[in-house]
Image (cartoon, rainbow, N blue to C red):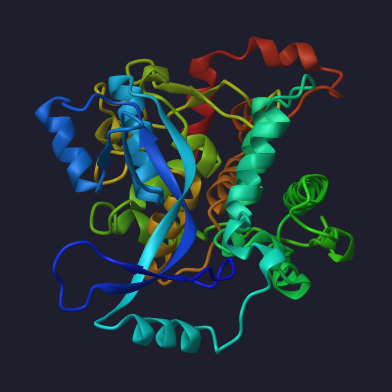
Amino acid sequence: MRLPNGYGSVIKLKGKRRKPYAVRTSEIAEFVEIDAPKDPPSNIRRELNRYNFKWKRKAQMWAAISSDAICEFAETLMQEEGYEYSIAYRQTFKYLEYFAKQEHAYAFLSELNNADAVAEHIKYAETPTFAEMYGKWKNYRKALPDKISSNTWRNYEIAFNHLSDLHHKKFNALRTDEVQECINKWTCKSNSTVSNIRTILNNLYKYALMNNYIEKDLSQFFVYSWVDPTEQIHSRYTNEEIATIWSKLYVINNVDLILITIYTGLRPTELLEITTDNVHLDEQYMIGGMKTEAGTDRVIPIADKILPLVKNRYDANRRFLVNNKYGNHYTYGSYVSANFNTVMNKLNMKHLPHDGRHTFASLMDDAGANEVCIKLIMGHSMKNNVTKGVYTHKTTQQLIDEVNKI
C-alpha cells in the first residue's frame, strides 16, 4: 500500500517475531561525520564510542547525530589529530509501535494522523528544516565568486544561532508569528545584531523561493526593531559585586572567566578564541580580538591580579586557552548557556556576558588610566583621531601599568 508522503509507514521486520509489523515515521536529522579510519588509536576510539559515533561502511567515516557537545568534540579532534569533519543531513527513522497483525498497524497509523491523509504534492517529509535550509544556502553562497569575509560569516553564524528555536522546524511550515516571536527575543540587542538576523532570514527565504521549496516569501512581513543606542543595554559590575566574585573564585566553577573579562576588556567571544600560542605569560600579555579592524589581533595586557588565573587556564598541549571541563573548545552559545548563566544564578546576579567589557572601561576611567591605552586595549577605532601617531608609541609594559591601576 502506497501512503502519502509524510504520513508514516508500516513495514514487516525480518525474522520470526511475535509482533513483526512496525509503524515508523521519518525525519531529516543533522549528522556530524568525521573522516577518521575504521580502526583509530584506542584513546580516540573510546571518545568516539562515548559520543555515540558509529562506523558507516559505505561512507567510510564515523557519524553521530549532531549536538553542541559532539560538534565541539569533532572540532577538537580535527585540531589535535587532523581528522576533518563535516555536517550532513540524512533521513532517519523513528519506530513508534509494533503489532502482530498488519491491519492493526495501519489502524494505529491512521489514528496517529487523525485519519487525514497528507496531500501527495506537498512532500512534507522531503522539505528541509530551517537548519538544513541554512546549510543549503550557505553552501550556495560560498560557491559564488563574490566572497563574504570570515568575520561576516562569523556574524551570520551568531545570527543563525539566535534563531535556534526554528532550527528543527520544517521551513515551508513556518508561521509568520512564530518567526516574529523568535526575532522579538533579540530586540534588546543592537542594530547590528538585529540586522544580521534580518539578513539571514531574507537570504533563506529568497533561496527557498528560488529553489521551489516555498511558494511565498514571508520575510517581507517580519518587523525588525532594536534598542535605541542612547538606551543603556549593559550594566557594569559594582565594586561590591566584583568583591563577591573574587570571594567565589574556584568555589564556583568558571568564575575566573568573568574576572578575566572584567580586567582585560575582552568580549566573551574574543576570550574563547584566544589560542595558547598567543598567550605570553612571561611578558604578561595576550594577542587576540575580533569584530573590527582596530580590534583584531591586538595586544591585551594581563593585569597582575588575573595573571594567576590565566596561568591556571594555560595548557600548552591544547589549542585554546579556555576549554570546558572535558577539555573541548567552547562555542559562544555553550559558554553562555552552560557557563555564564549558571554562574550568574549561583551568584544571584543579573548581567549580560558583555558586561565584563563594559565594567573594564568604567574601572579604567575611574582609575584615571591613559585614554589612548584604554582605546588600544579595547580595540577602539582611531581612524578619526588627529593624534593617531600617538597610538603606535605605547609599549606593552605601558599597557600593563595602566591595567594594574584597577
**Residue 243 visible in the snapshot:** no
- Res. 376 visible in picture: yes
Image position of 278 with respect to 50: above or below: above
Q: Residue at x 75, y 28 (%)?
A: 381
Position in image of residue 348 (x %, y %): 41, 72
Residue at left offset 56%, top offset 68%: 6
Q: Looking at the image, how many numbered discs can be counted on the residues?
A: 0
- Position of residue 3 in the picture relative to residue 334 (left or right): right
Q: Is residue 215 above or below residue 329?
A: below
Residue 300, given in percent of the width and then of the height, sits at 51, 26
- Residue at point 78%, 52% (across, down): 205
- Quadrant location of residue 364? top right
Q: Is residue 232 left or right of residue 228?
A: left
Instruction: Give residue 260's position: percent from left, percent from top.
Output: 42, 41
Which residue is more in the foreground, 146 or 207? 207
Q: What is the residue that sits farthest to the left in this orientation?
A: 42
Residue at 57% from the left image edge and 20% from the top image edge: 297
Q: Nearer the viewer, residue 2 or 137?
A: 2
